[in-house]
Image (tube, rainbow, N blue to C red):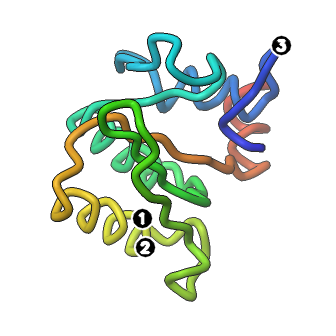
Amino acid sequence: MKGRFSGGLSKEEEFLEKYVFYDLEDLNDGFDSPSIKYFSKDDFEKILDRAEFYGLKIFGIEPWPDRQFFNVRVYEEYDTSADNPEWYRDAYDRFLEEGVTSYFSATYGVPENLLKKFLI
């Protein structure tokens, strides 16, 4: 699973840590697997901006308000590619409209060309 890991960091996870999650606060205080990062509304908006900037794939967004599963939205529901920011921005906006304001998590994919460019 991309963006969720155990043990040593994969190249994708290393990229996410260095270029996407830097300076953001992981809200996972032990309520879920330590490999799953959760973010506030403001921090998750930064993640979406960075994902769009780098052309990352976001396969799904899963908020856990009150540390309880709420819902999940995946790119397949939008009949588009995982790297199309229209789908993940719409999914995020819909969660906000439903009252979710924190504990956003996602699964990510980092294109091979970025790994080669930034991690060699």
Quadrant containing the C terminus is top right
**Contact, CB < 8 Å: mark 2 with mark 3?**
no
Q: Quadrant of residue 87?
A: bottom left
Q: Nearer the viewer, residue 28 or 89?
A: 28
Write the residue at 75% across / 49% down. 113
Q: Position of residue 40 (x, y in %)?
A: 27, 31
Find residue 87 and name its label. Answer: 2
- Cβ atoms at labels 2 and 1 below 8 Å apart: yes
Whether tag 1 and tag 3 are in contact, CB under 8 A, the answer is: no
Q: Quadrant of the N terminus?
A: top right
User: Whole-Å distance between the Cαs marked 2 and 1?
Assistant: 4 Å
- Mark 1 or mark 3: name the one nearer the start of the chain: 3
Q: Nearer the viewer, residue 41 or 70?
A: 70
Residue that carries the numbered disc 1 in the rendered image: 88
Instruction: Give residue 82's quadrant in the image.
Output: bottom right
The amino acid at mark 3 is Gly
Amino acid found under the numbered disc labelled 2: Trp
Which residue is drawn at the image coordinates 64% and 22% (left, top)? Answer: 33
Q: Residues within 10 Å of mark 1 (few under 14, many from 20)?
A: many
Give coordinates of residue 110: x percent, y percent.
68, 47
Q: Give the amino acid type for the residue marked by disc 1 in the picture.
A: Tyr
Q: Residues within 10 Å of mark 3 (few under 14, many from 20)?
A: few
Q: Above or below — where is 2 with respect to 5?
A: below
Q: Give the label on residue 8, or none.
A: 3
Question: What element does badge 2 sit on?
Answer: helix
Q: Left or right of 116: which side holds 85?
A: left
User: Measured along the vertical axis of the image, is residue 32 above or below residue 80?
Assistant: above
Of labels 2 and 3, earlier in sequence is 3
Q: Secondary structure at mark 1?
A: helix
Which secondary structure lies at badge 3?
Answer: loop
